[in-house]
Image (tube, helix red, strand yellow):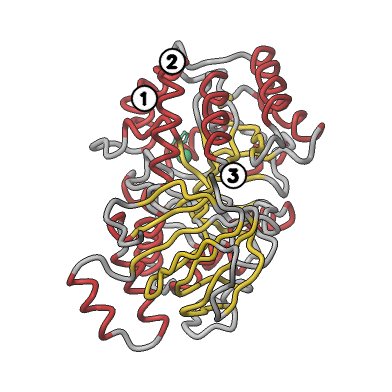
């Protein structure tokens, strides 16, 4: 039986607002060490210094860090099978590794097993919500939604649209794709914690007619999300210029089709200009910055600072299998390195905010996830500050909270994660967690 009243004690860290760039001391940071987080019927109801009385199931994680569950705003579930593929840039990588792996997801059993492994892997890294690309096959989206529903997770996904420039077994057509989308929307959009995203793979793999159909779906129901890739790789950008000569820019291809709106999640956005950034701000759309993928595929260095200065929302994403890890701490560390190469410093506050409350706000889900405000669903993870002597020594000499959290973020891996809860229910627990 699941207790309806649970209290967890630990060092609670969340954000009240967006921390300013470069600020290691920020009023946006809410650090409440050694406090009890009270959860009733899956929702956070209070934070307090004293243990609650009778009727509460209490779990004392004193000396551990408790964070809101991470939100990965761009990841490909079938691409676990191509993570760490050697030696190519985006377009070759798609042809050589990714498309063959995605073909297998036409099979319902492959799709079902793959979805389960993928979601459990997210939970085993402290990620409780994700915006996900399955494959072109309707069944791949269907099984992903079903697996997310079984775990109570907040997942936004949709069948991938691609009706050209893709191999046999990975193309749809406009009419069939529209029918599949409408059917999936009817069955999954708004059901439990699931939402549908009109999922255009990227401009080169959709005909103008398919882009127009996708735009019409968005116009017909403004509660739908839209996800795609934009301006990731220079050869890709050049190809889009040739395919869509009438568009001002790559981003403009989507804007013209009615695909740029407040629920649009666009991965990468490395090769954007000032007009593109202004268009993102005006639309309220977000860039899902994918640093490990950008480094691994040699795509380029995203200018986070310029996006922020232009008022465009930025969230953070693993982009596995172009990305090299499902772990958000590993992803945030790569984001730090990308900014460092541009002479910028990404604080732990800016990073962690982007992977929690910032992503929630950009997705219009701030009322549900991303922080420990009362009323939010209790999607959270309990982490050890250190899991072995190297980390313990580093923690011991850290001066001040930012230094400690930044060093933790640099070193945190799966061995640090103790427990992950989704709407209060534990969905992952490390063996040898030290908790009875
Ligand atoms: N652009 C189009 N498809 C993909 C994909 O699967 N991964 C990445 N990183 N970029 C893409
Ligand atoms: Zn991607």
Note whether 271 is above or below 170 in the view shown: below
Pick the front one: 255 or 54: 54
Q: Quick check: is the Cβ at mark 2 less than 8 Å away from ligand 1? A: no
Query: Please, is residue 338 above or below residue 25 in the view?
Result: above
**Within 10 Å of the Cα at label 3, are there few (<14), some (14-19), or many (20+) other Cα atoms?**
many
Residue at horizontal 56 percent and vertical 54 percent from the top = 424
Q: Position of residue 244 (x, y in %)?
A: 61, 31
Q: Position of residue 264 (x, y in %)?
A: 66, 45
Identify the mark nearer the N-term, 3 or 2. Answer: 3
Dot 1: few (<14), some (14–19), or many (≥20) neighbours within 10 Å?
some
The residue located at (50%, 72%) in the rendering is 13
Q: Ligand 1: which quarter?
A: top left
**Label ID, residue 167:** 2
Residue 95, numbered circle: 1
What residue sits right under mark 3 in the picture? 154
| Count of numbered labels shown in the rendering | 3
Q: 10 Å neighbourhood of mark 2: few (<14), some, or many (≥20)?
A: few
Q: Residue furthest front?
A: 54
User: Could you tell me which secondary element the residue under label 2 belongs to?
Assistant: loop
């Amino acid at each position: 039986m699941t207790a309806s009243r649970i209290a967890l004690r630990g060092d609670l860290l969340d954000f009240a607002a967006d921390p300013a760039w470069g600020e290691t001391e920020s009023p946006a940071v809410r650090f409440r060490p050694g406090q009890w987080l009270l959860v009733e019927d899956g929702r956070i109801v209070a934070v307090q210094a004293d243990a609650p009385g009778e009727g509460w199931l209490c779990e004392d994680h004193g000396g551990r860090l408790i964070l809101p569950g991470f939100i990965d705003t761009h990841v490909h579930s079938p691409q676990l099978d191509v993570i760490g593929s050697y030696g190519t840039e985006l377009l070759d990588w798609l042809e050589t590794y990714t498309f063959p792996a995605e073909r297998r997801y036409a099979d319902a059993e492959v799709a079902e097993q793959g979805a389960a492994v993928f979601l459990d892997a997210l939970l085993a890294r402290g990620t409780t919500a994700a915006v996900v690309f399955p494959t072109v096959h309707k069944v791949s989206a269907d099984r992903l939604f079903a697996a997310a529903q079984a775990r109570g997770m907040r997942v936004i996904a949709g069948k991938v649209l691609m009706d050209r420039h893709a191999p046999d077994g990975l193309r749809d057509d406009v009419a069939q794709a529209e029918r599949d989308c409408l059917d999936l929307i009817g069955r999954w959009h708004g059901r439990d914690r699931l939402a549908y995203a009109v999922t255009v793979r990227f401009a080169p793999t959709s005909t103008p007619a398919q882009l127009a159909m996708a735009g019409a779906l968005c116009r017909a129901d403004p509660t739908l999300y839209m996800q795609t890739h934009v301006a990731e790789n220079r050869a890709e950008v050049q190809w889009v210029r040739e395919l869509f000569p009438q568009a001002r820019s790559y981003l403009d291809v989507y804007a013209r089709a009615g695909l740029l709106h407040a629920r649009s999640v666009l991965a990468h956005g490395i090769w954007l200009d000032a007009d593109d950034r202004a268009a993102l701000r005006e639309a309220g759309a977000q860039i899902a910055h994918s640093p490990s993928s950008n480094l691994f595929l040699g795509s380029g260095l995203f200018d986070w600072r310029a996006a922020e200065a232009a008022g465009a929302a930025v969230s953070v994403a693993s982009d596995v299998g172009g990305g090299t890890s499902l772990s958000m701490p590993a992803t945030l560390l790569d984001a730090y390195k990308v900014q460092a190469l541009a002479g910028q410093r990404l604080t732990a506050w800016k990073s962690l905010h982007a992977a929690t409350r910032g992503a929630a706000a950009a997705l219009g889900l701030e009322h549900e996830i991303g922080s420990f405000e009362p009323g939010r669903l209790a999607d959270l993870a309990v982490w050890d500050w250190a899991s072995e002597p190297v980390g313990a020594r580093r923690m011991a000499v850290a001066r001040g909270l930012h230094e400690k959290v930044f060093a933790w973020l640099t070193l945190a891996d799966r061995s640090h994660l103790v427990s992950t809860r989704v709407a209060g229910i534990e969905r992952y627990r490390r063996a040898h967690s030290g908790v009875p």
